[in-house]
């Protein structure tokens, strides 16, 4: 039996818009997604999908067992909002002062609920199990970690995962699909520099931590230009620099914090050593001492070859080959990467841009919005991806 997820998704478009507006009007911050979770549970139960609550604190998991045996595929959406005040003048404007779905996670949760409805209707034909992962607290990089620690990828064990993020840079109707790196690894750095204080008029009696820090900031950029291949890339940014107590005192201490972004795990691995070397040697030259704290915060979103191949075909069934675009890399991070460290997976960019209607604003903008015609596309591509993955795996298994 062939199932036309494209047509079926269109049929539930109005319902999805209503669901998305409920989430949009009632945004909740990370790990406080109580009403959001309740609504998700209600809707999953309406589709007769088994529900597990409080996975990773406020996360919800739905499990749909198909009529035939097979593998397990997970579909994931994040569900939290941001501490931002909405500036849009729309009927579905956020009702919660200072909280807004400014990253469009309302559209992700809705797309995933739509996929659950679509797959629920064809459960008899489903060759395996679909797990619907509604992840809390993505905005603070803690949701995926909490859910994985709670065993979301086990019982039943997940074989592959698909997910999506909206993109205000891709027109509604199109979907970004790309094998390999898509979103950056996000790392956090702290640098401490120790000198010795002295009178501002007698610097030769002290060891100036501010001068050493200035040289460190400059020299760190030479890593990107001289230690990373021209065919690779990295971003090393210092975001804060604090030191000194008075205009006429040589400072004995400076503290800096920053972030590093990379797409290739091999480049990422090298950064702590390269940075430490620059910091220590530079400080030595200035008669100071330097320390680096390097935290690997999130790996890069890297789309695995086989799941991406299945995904691309699935997406083309929903938006046609012309609707597929190759998205640009983004320097932003996504904790979907943590699932991809455990199981092969593919992450899409769902186009939500509509220039005519002024829907062009970046993620986390007070004017962020989406073209709601994308909701049924989001539902369609997730449902199709899960269905096709299970079909392919069961036919591969029989060979
Ligand atoms: Ni987001």
Image (spheres, rainbow, N blue to C red):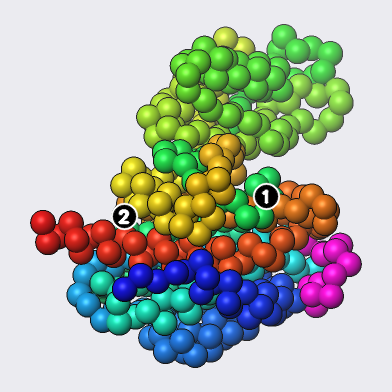
Magenta residues, as a range? 82-96
Q: Nearer the viewer, residue 301 or 271?
A: 301
Q: Quadrant of the N terminus?
A: bottom left
Q: Crowding near pointer 1: few (<14 within 10 Å), some, many (20+)?
A: many
Q: Nearer the viewer, residue 379 or 76?
A: 379
User: Could you say which quadrant of the image residue 221 lies in?
Assistant: top right
Residue carrying label 1: 171
User: Could you say which quadrant of the image residue 70 lies in?
Assistant: bottom left
> Which residue sits furthest front?
1
Residue depicted at x 63% and y 55% = 173
Q: Residue 320: x percent and y percent?
A: 51, 52
Residue depicted at x 37% and y 29% = 266
Q: CA distance from mark 1 to mark 2?
A: 30 Å
Q: Nearer the viewer, mark 1 or mark 2?
A: 1
Q: Is residue 184 visible?
A: yes
Q: Nearer the viewer, residue 43 or 122?
A: 122
Q: Crowding near pointer 2: few (<14 within 10 Å), some, many (20+)?
A: some
Residue depicted at x 71% and y 76% = 21
Residue carrying label 2: 343
């Amino acid at each position: 039996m062939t199932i036309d997820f494209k047509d079926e998704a269109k049929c539930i478009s109005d319902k999805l818009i209503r669901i998305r507006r409920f989430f949009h009007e009632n945004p909740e911050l990370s790990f406080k997604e109580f009403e959001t979770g309740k609504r998700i549970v209600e809707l999953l139960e309406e589709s007769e999908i088994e529900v597990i609550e409080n996975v990773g604190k406020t996360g919800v998991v739905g499990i749909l067992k198909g009529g035939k045996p097979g593998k397990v595929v997970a579909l994931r959406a994040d569900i939290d909002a941001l501490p931002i005040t909405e500036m849009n003048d729309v009927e579905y404007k956020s009702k919660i002062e200072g909280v807004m779905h400014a990253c469009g996670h309302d559209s992700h949760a809705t797309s995933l609920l739509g996929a659950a409805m679509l797959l629920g209707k064809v459960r008899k034909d489903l060759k395996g199990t679909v797990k619907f992962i509604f992840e809390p607290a993505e905005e603070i990089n803690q949701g995926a970690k909490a859910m994985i620690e709670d065993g979301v990828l086990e019982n039943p064990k997940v074989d592959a995962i698909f997910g999506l993020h909206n993109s205000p840079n891709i027109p509604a109707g199109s979907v970004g699909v790309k094998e390999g790196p898509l979103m950056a690894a996000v790392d956090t750095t702290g640098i401490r520099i120790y000198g010795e204080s002295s009178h501002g008029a007698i610097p030769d009696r002290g060891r100036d931590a501010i001068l050493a820090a200035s040289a460190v900031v400059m020299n760190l950029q030479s890593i990107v230009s001289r230690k990373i291949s021209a065919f690779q890339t990295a971003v090393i940014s210092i975001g804060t620099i604090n030191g000194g107590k008075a205009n006429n005192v040589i400072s004995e201490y400076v503290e800096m914090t920053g972030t590093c972004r990379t797409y290739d795990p091999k480049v990422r691995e090298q950064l702590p050593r390269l940075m430490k070397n620059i910091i220590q040697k530079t400080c030595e030259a200035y008669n100071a001492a330097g320390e680096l704290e390097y935290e690997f915060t999130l790996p890069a979103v890297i789309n695995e070859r086989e799941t991406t191949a299945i995904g691309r075909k699935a997406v083309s069934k929903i938006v046609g080959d012309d609707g597929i675009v190759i998205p640009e890399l983004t320097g932003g991070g996504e904790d979907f990467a943590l699932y991809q460290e455990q199981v092969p997976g593919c992450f899409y960019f769902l186009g939500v841009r509509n220039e005519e209607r002024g829907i062009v604003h970046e993620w986390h903008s007070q004017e962020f919005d989406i073209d709601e015609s994308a909701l049924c596309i989001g539902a369609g591509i997730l449902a199709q991806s899960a269905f096709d993955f299970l079909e392919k795996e069961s036919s591969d298994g029989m060979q």
